[in-house]
Image (spheres, rainbow, N blue to C red):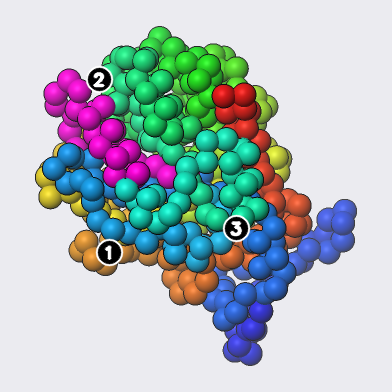
């Protein structure tokens, strides 16, 4: 890695002693721009299965807007260095008014994603064998996800239909309650005492079919109840430890309800689950790596993964989109109909559909990012003292374990 001589004066080294020897920790707010990729970083990226467990690919969810814009997902994935993404979307950013709206939007979204995958010559991975085969061929792949069970509308049989359409990752809850609620959302006052009876039935059916359950957006009480129901390990794909708030107080206040406590993280890990760390509240890859380190110190390296809540492809705004349910516009200031990250890490909005804000796009997650996402993260993890084996676990192996536990034999 080439570092300009002027950069050395801005580096601050904190030396910590470990059982393995001396580890040098870098100031997370230093200038970190990489002019060329370290061969060691490139080797780790090539060898490991890197997975972003929550990546929004914006597509239309209204039939009149299909098939949607052409996007170059394949090039963005190759640039990122990621082997796979959990390719997600949501249907509740436009108000769900009529019976069937949720399911119609869900099926439209899947059809649009079919078009994205076909035009990019990409395939869905339905199990771990598919993931490994794609990685061996050096072909990017996706795992189909949806954020929120709004499409179910109280009908369990729709899970079978979704499974046959390739769904393998279900975010049980999202920002708005489904017409037949599944549980309490962590950003809303509790109404259902945690997990509802229908929510429990959905989890049981997902276990039966082979769909990984994601408990992001669930209140602690909902999570605890879900862990008592599921027979498979769960995922919390995108959050952060509630002690890692960054320096922007406005941003921290907004994001605080979406973060996980040390106690709750231990409960999930002790049940075999895996928790993804998002890029929000981190102003550089090094700060992101230290947020990962903080969670690893709580739950162990076997229970942490990457879940950015960013977008590899450009934001899409429906011409039919009105104010978000609740009257607050699209999610956390997002200028699109499909959700994704909140305003960037310093709290500023991009302003305009053609001006992505820093932090919105995966390969533009930080200021001055000059290399693909996973390359930047692996570089930062090495600099914060993680070994190659630990990086492999965080980068994808931990997710692969719970994905395999959910889908094996189906």
Q: For the image shown, how many numbered marks are present on the structure? A: 3
Residue 401 visible in this rendered orientation of the protein? yes
Q: Earlier in the sequence, mark 1 or mark 3?
A: 3
Label 1, label 2: how far apart the Cα atoms are: 33 Å
- At a point 52% along the width and 71% down the height, the residue shown is 371
The residue wearing badge 3 is 138
Marks 3/2: CA distance? 42 Å
Q: Which residue is mark 2?
A: 179
Q: Secondary structure at mark 1?
A: loop
Q: State the extent of the magenta-drawn residues as a range.
A: 86-114
> How would you rate the neighbour count of disc 2 (Cα within 10 Å): few for under 14, some for 14-19, many for 20 or more?
some
| Residue 210 as seen in the image, left or right of residue 146 | right
Q: Residue at x 64, y 45 (%)?
A: 132
Let me know if residue 100 is in the magenta part.
Answer: yes
Q: Is residue 161 left or right of residue 79?
A: left
The N terminus sits in image quarter: bottom right
Compared to 136, does 111 lie above or below?
A: above
Q: Residues within 10 Å of mark 3 (few under 14, many from 20)?
A: few
User: From this viewpoint, is residue 309 visible?
Assistant: no
Residue at figure coordinates x 69%, y 51% from the top left = 392
Which residue has dot 1 on it?
A: 350
Q: CA distance from mark 1 to mark 3?
A: 34 Å
């Amino acid at each position: 890695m080439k570092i300009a001589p002027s950069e050395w004066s801005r580096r601050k080294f904190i030396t910590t002693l470990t059982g393995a020897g001396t580890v040098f920790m870098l100031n997370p707010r230093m200038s970190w721009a990489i002019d060329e990729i370290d061969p060691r970083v490139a080797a780790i990226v090539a060898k490991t299965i890197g997975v972003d467990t929550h990546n929004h690919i914006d597509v239309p969810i209204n039939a009149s807007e299909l098939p949607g814009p052409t996007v170059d997902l394949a090039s963005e994935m190759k640039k990122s260095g990621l082997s796979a993404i959990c390719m997600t979307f949501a249907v509740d950013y436009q108000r769900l008014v009529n019976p069937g709206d949720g399911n119609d939007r869900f099926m439209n979204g899947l059809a649009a994603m079919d078009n994205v995958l076909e035009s990019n010559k990409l395939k869905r991975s339905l199990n771990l064998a598919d993931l490994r085969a794609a990685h061996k061929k050096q072909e990017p792949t996706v795992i189909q996800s949806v954020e929120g069970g709004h499409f179910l509308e109280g009908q369990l049989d729709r899970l079978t239909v979704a499974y046959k359409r390739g769904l393998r990752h279900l975010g049980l809850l999202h920002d708005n309650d489904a017409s037949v609620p599944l549980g309490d959302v962590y950003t809303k006052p509790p109404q259902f005492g945690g997990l509802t009876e229908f929510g429990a039935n959905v989890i049981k059916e997902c276990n039966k079919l082979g769909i990984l359950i994601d408990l992001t957006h669930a209140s602690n009480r909902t999570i605890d109840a879900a862990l008592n129901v599921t027979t498979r390990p769960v995922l919390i794909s995108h959050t952060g430890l509630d002690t890692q708030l960054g320096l922007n107080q406005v941003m921290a206040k907004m994001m605080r309800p979406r973060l996980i406590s040390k106690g709750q993280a231990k409960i999930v890990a002790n049940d075999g689950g895996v928790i993804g760390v998002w890029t929000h509240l981190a102003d550089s890859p090094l700060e992101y790596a230290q947020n990962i380190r903080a969670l690893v110190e709580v739950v162990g390296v076997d229970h942490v993964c990457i879940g950015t809540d960013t977008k590899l492809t450009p934001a899409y705004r429906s011409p039919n989109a009105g104010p978000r349910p609740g009257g607050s516009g699209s999610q956390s200031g997002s200028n699109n109909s499909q959700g994704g990250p909140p305003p960037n890490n310093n709290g500023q909005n991009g302003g305009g559909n053609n001006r992505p804000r820093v932090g919105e796009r995966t390969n533009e997650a930080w200021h001055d990012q000059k290399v693909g996402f996973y390359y930047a993260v692996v570089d930062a993890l090495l600099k914060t003292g993680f070994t190659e084996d630990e990086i492999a676990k965080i980068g994808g192996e931990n997710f692969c374990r719970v994905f395999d536990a959910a889908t094996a034999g189906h």
